Structure formats: structure tokens, C-alpha cells
Image (tube, grey):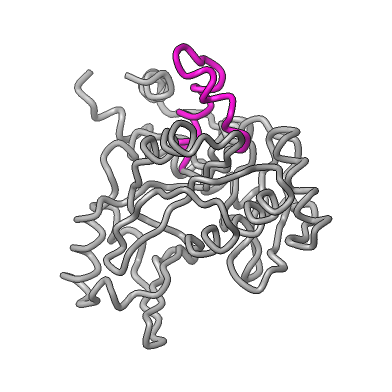
């Protein structure tokens, strides 16, 4: 059983957890409100594009999806390839093969990886406890972790959208979480808002034991939760490398940023506590 699951299970038996901001937010240098200044893509896309253009990285492992919303991790070595992967993906995506391909076959020397909190944790462990992957792990220069309440299975996502709502996956142009809804923008312009609780059955079981909402192991954590205006994103800067690349992106005119407000931080904390409590409830039901 992972250490964080053991801790949640043990504490849960004591009548519930006292969850602090440090538990949810992790260690960080600063929390910023960020907006892309580029004509295409969001803040994370702009950040990675700037890092590539400036030579801070020579490639990135990003996720693309086809018309059936089947995700695939790919290696991007140009700004156009990064832009082609813009947008949220809601189905879990295996990353290891693409990372190894970037480092071994393509022999890239400094890559960025964008992933979920669990993927960020695995990458951080590779870097801090290298064992047989030391030389490879040292070439992962930037880990960008995305705020995450859980990833859907491909079947769970398709069943909910197609069976219950009659929406064919190729009809979907964009999908994102807005307030308490999973919001689908269709290619014909229609907007469909599905209550988030209706998707809970499609979330991967392993996600239910995870208490990491803010990707605490990353160099930069990024997400919409806590941002108030359309197009804004929250960046939690956790390392000097992350801070340097954000500053580079701003100097190049790819992004603009300002310090997050207490209200922004409280919204992130609220969502993080909800995930932590869910992990507590789930692990209490486990038979071990």
C-alpha cells in the first residue's frame, strides 16, 4: 500500500483528518495567476512553447487525443507540435514509453513532461532515487503537474457521454470542468453541462485513493481551480527551475502573471480538501 494511502487510512480511523494548507498545497515558492498572451493555446502551452523557443528544453512529452478522445503521449520538438496537443485530456494516459523514447531513441537532453499528480510523483522519484535510471532521469528538466480530481477510464467516459446524453465523441470540440459541471463544447457550437457527480462512476478506482490534487511533486503545478477570470490559470511555482522558466516566458511575451490572492488560494485549498476527504472515505472501505 502506498505511504500516503497508509497515512490516510490510519488517520481516518481516528475520526477524520485535520488537513492543513501545507498538506494540500505542498512546498512552494510562490502562487501566481497566469494568462497566455499567445493567439493559440493556454498558459501551460505558452510556458512550454517559450521554454522550447528559448532553448531551456529541447522537447516535451505532451498528450494528444483523436476524435474518439483516445489519448496518446507524444514527443513534441517544435512549437507547432506543442500547440497541436493543447487542451485538457480527461482519460488516463500512459507516459513511460514516450518518455523513454524521448530520452533513449530521440536522445533529447533536456525535456519537459506534463502530467497528472501521480505521474509527477513517479518522475520526481526517478530523479531523487535514480537507481538504474539516473542518467535518463537527470535529463528530465521540467515537470509540470496538472491539478487533478481523477482521470476517467476510456469506457467510463464514452458510456456517460454517448449512452446517457446521446453525444458522439467525435462531436466534442472541447471539455473542461466549470464549477460543479463537466462542460462539453460541441463542434456545432452547443454547450452541454453535465453534473460532475454523474461522472464519478467513470473515474479510475486508483484515483479514489489519491489525496494529491495540486501535483505536489512537480516543478510547476497548473490548473483552472482558483482562477476567477476566463483564460486565467493558477501556477504553483515549486522549484527555482520552474521559476526561471516562467520568468523566461514572461520576458519573451508568451505569458503575463501576477501574485495570486488569498481568495484564489482558498479555492484551491477547498478543492484539495475535497479530494483528500474522498481518499479518506475510500481507503476506510479497503479490506487491508
Residue visible at 54% across and 46% down in the picture: 60
Instruction: In the rendered view, tell whether residue 158 sits above or below residue 286.
Output: below
In the rendered image of this protein, does residue 172 appear above or below residue 108?
below
Q: Residue at x 34, y 70 (%)?
A: 194
User: In which quarter of the view is residue 214 placed?
Assistant: top right
Tell which residue pokes out farthest to the right in this image.
251
Residue 276 can be seen in this image = no
Query: Which segment is the magenta one?
Result: 116-142
Rendered-image quadrant of the C terminus: top left
Is 163 positioned to the left or the right of 119 in the image? left
State left or right for residue 14 relative to residue 267: left
- At which x and y percent is residue 236? 67, 43
Percent from the top left, x then y, of residue 168?
Answer: 23, 75
Task: Give the image quarter of residue 64.
Answer: bottom left
The total number of labels drawn is 0
Residue at position x 53%, y 42% in the image:
113
Name the image quarter holding the N terminus: top left
In the rendered image, residue 192, in percent from the top left (x then y), is placed at 36, 78
Depth check, front residue: 20 or 145? 145
Residue in view at x 79 percent, y 62 percent:
253
**In the foreground, 35 or 96:** 96
Tell me if residue 122 is in the magenta stretch. yes
Q: Could you say where residue 106 lies in the image, as x and y percent from the top left?
A: 48, 39
Amino acid at each position: 500500500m502506498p505511504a500516503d494511502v497508509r497515512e490516510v487510512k490510519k488517520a481516518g480511523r481516528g475520526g477524520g483528518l485535520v488537513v492543513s494548507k501545507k498538506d494540500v498545497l505542498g512546498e512552494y515558492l510562490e502562487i501566481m495567476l497566469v494568462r497566455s498572451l499567445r493567439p493559440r493555446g493556454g498558459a501551460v502551452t505558452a510556458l512550454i512553447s517559450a521554454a522550447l523557443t528559448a532553448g531551456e528544453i529541447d522537447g516535451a512529452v505532451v498528450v494528444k487525443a483523436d476524435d474518439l478522445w483516445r489519448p496518446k503521449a507524444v514527443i513534441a520538438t517544435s512549437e507547432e507540435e506543442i500547440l497541436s496537443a493543447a487542451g485538457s485530456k480527461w482519460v488516463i494516459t500512459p507516459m513511460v514509453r514516450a518518455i523513454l523514447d524521448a530520452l533513449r531513441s530521440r536522445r533529447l537532453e533536456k525535456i519537459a513532461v506534463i502530467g497528472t499528480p501521480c505521474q509527477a510523483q513517479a518522475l520526481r522519484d526517478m530523479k531523487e532515487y535514480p537507481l538504474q535510471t539516473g542518467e535518463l532521469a537527470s535529463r528530465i528538466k521540467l515537470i509540470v503537474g496538472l491539478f487533478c480530481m481523477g482521470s476517467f477510464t476510456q469506457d467510463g467516459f464514452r458510456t456517460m457521454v454517448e449512452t446517457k446524453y446521446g453525444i458522439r465523441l467525435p462531436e466534442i470540440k472541447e471539455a473542461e470542468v466549470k464549477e460543479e459541471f463537466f462542460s462539453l463544447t460541441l463542434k456545432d457550437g452547443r454547450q452541454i453541462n453535465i453534473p460532475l457527480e454523474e461522472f464519478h462512476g467513470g473515474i479510475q478506482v486508483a484515483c479514489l485513493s489519491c489525496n494529491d490534487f495540486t501535483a505536489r511533486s512537480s516543478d510547476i503545478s497548473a490548473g483552472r481551480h482558483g482562477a476567477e477570470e476566463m483564460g486565467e490559470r493558477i501556477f504553483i511555482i515549486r522549484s527555482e527551475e520552474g521559476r526561471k522558466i516562467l520568468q523566461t516566458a514572461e520576458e519573451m511575451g508568451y505569458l503575463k502573471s501576477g501574485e495570486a490572492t488569498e481568495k484564489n488560494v482558498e479555492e484551491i485549498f477547498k478543492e484539495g480538501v475535497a479530494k483528500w476527504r474522498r481518499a479518506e472515505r475510500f481507503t476506510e472501505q479497503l479490506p487491508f
